[in-house]
Image (tube, grey):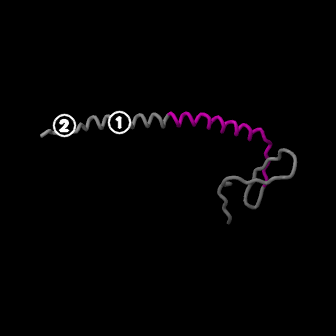
Amino acid sequence: MLKKPPKNNDSRKTRFIAFAIGLLAILTAGIVFLFAPYRRDIQAAHKRLQSLDSYTIDTPYGQMEYAVQGNGYPLFLIHGNGGVITIT
């Protein structure tokens, strides 16, 4: 009868570690590759917003910032979570 050779756990561990390191390297490169354009776009958006003349008004619920730009019919746009509103 032929005996099976013993399993080599060291080889299996080495392959797993190499796979994990490779996967981590790919994920890190992907994050770096995606973060650079994201950061550039966010900085460009901040510059565009800073170039606008903005105004604030006091409302019963706190201050509201707005900008007036362009021509045509007025558009009132609220986006995102405007912060915490506490009504007492």
Question: Looking at the picture, which amino acid does disc 1 mark?
Answer: Ile
Residues shaded magenta: 29-57
Q: Is residue 38 left or right of residue 23?
A: right
For discs 1 and 2, the disc positioned in front in the rendered view: 2
Quadrant of res 49: top right
Residue 5 location in percent, x, y? 19, 37
Residue drawn at the location 15% of the way across and 39% of the way down: 3
Residue drawn at the location 31% of the way across and 34% of the way down: 14
Label 1, on which residue? 17
The C terminus is located in which quarter? bottom right
Label 2, on which residue? 5
For mark 2, give the secondary structure.
Answer: loop
For mark 1, give the secondary structure.
Answer: helix
State the residue in front, 74 or 19.
19
Residue drawn at the location 78% of the way across and 56% of the way down: 58
Precedes in sequence: disc 1 or disc 2: 2
Residue 84 location in percent, x, y? 65, 57
Quadrant of res 59: bottom right
